[in-house]
Amino acid sequence: MRKLVKWLVRIVVVVVVVVGVLFAAVYVLSEQRMAKVYAIEPAVPPVPGDPDAVERGAHVAAIRGCRDCHGKDMGSATFIDDPLFARLSGPNLTPAGPGGKFSDVELVRAIRHGVGKDGRSLLFMPSQEFSHLSDQDMGDLLAYLHSLPAVDKTPPENRVGPIGRALFVAGKVPLLPAEVVDHDAKPAEPEIAATAAYGAYLSAACMGCHGKAFSGGHIPGTPPDWPDAANLTPGPGGLGDWSEAEFSKALREGIAKGGRPLQTQYMPVSATRHLTDVEVSALFAFLRSLPAKGQGQH
């Protein structure tokens, strides 16, 4: 019996040591990648100062999901708070916060390239969705940020936990946008119209959850109990038999075809409800033009 206990103790010790070594390796590897410095000096588009531009910039911030991470007042919001995975908050972008003191070059670098003031990659900033943002949208967005009133709010310090680091090293979580952004991308020049081409431009905001093929499936980096993103292609279970009116109601009211309520804690109706009629029509035209795929197919 004593020999058995000794062997069990030895096994437990070995397992603990192996796990400790693995987590130490994960920490070192993730820290090395997080410490990489990117030398990027982006061009800044013209920043208009008229009220219409500010209003248009507020619209861009609303439909592109900026307020999900930075808060409705852009003074910061904590969007992930799990001690094992990560605690992440968008910075305060008002004059009272650090983001409000960024120069326009630093703001463009953060938005389009996912690189912070210190030259290191930001955490979970979806810059891959903004790298092709048009100069007009970027200029209007900057005009809106310049107009923000000060909000006295200090978010908790960002940190990535052991599970978050392990998933990042394993390639399961896109933690560092600067690693995946095309830093040579040129700004798009979309024509604002109810066309599939304009819908393709707007659809970049949908890729983070629905994937590059828009076929849905598990959202990378989310817990196993999160629902899969919906299939937005005309394939089985997708939008093939939806009308534009039904699509619009889902985006604006969170009600799917047949009256089924969407889970708005996951589906960002808080952002999509701000889409204009032209933007809804353009998105619908683009999604209906996609190759039909099954749920989660690429």
Image: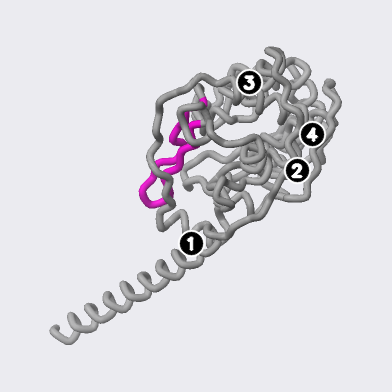
Q: Position of residue 152 (x, y in %)?
A: 40, 25
Asked whether 167 or 141 is in front, the reply is 141
Q: Position of residue 92 (x, y in %)?
A: 48, 32
- Kindly report which numbered mark, 3 or 4, lies closer to the viewer in this rendering: 3
The amino acid marked with disc number 4 is Ala
Query: What is the spatial separation of the Cα atoms under label 1 and label 4, in whole angstroms?
Result: 35 Å
Q: Residue at x 71, y 18 (%)?
A: 53
Q: Residue at x 53, y 62 (%)?
A: 169
User: Which quadrant holds residue 179?
Assistant: bottom right
In this image, 178 relative to 240: left or right?
left
The amino acid marked with disc number 3 is Ala
List the residue tagged with mark 3.
58
The amino acid marked with disc number 1 is Glu
Of pointers 1 and 4, the one earlier in the residue sequence:
1
Of pointers 4 and 2, the one earlier in the residue sequence:
4
Q: Is label 1 in contact with label 2 (beta carbons under 8 Å)?
A: no
Q: Residues within 10 Å of mark 3 (few under 14, many from 20)?
A: many
List the residue tagged with mark 4.
200
**Element on which disc 3 rests:** helix
Q: Residues within 10 Å of mark 1 (few under 14, many from 20)?
A: few
Q: Quadrant of the N terminus?
A: bottom left
Q: Is residue 83 magenta?
A: yes
**Element on which disc 2 rests:** loop
Q: Residue furthest top?
A: 51
Q: Position of residue 25 (x, y in %)?
A: 45, 70
Query: What is the spatial separation of the Cα atoms under label 1 and label 3, in whole angstroms?
Result: 35 Å
User: Which quadrant holds residue 146?
Assistant: top right
| Range of residues picked out in magenta | 74-92
List the residue tagged with mark 1.
31
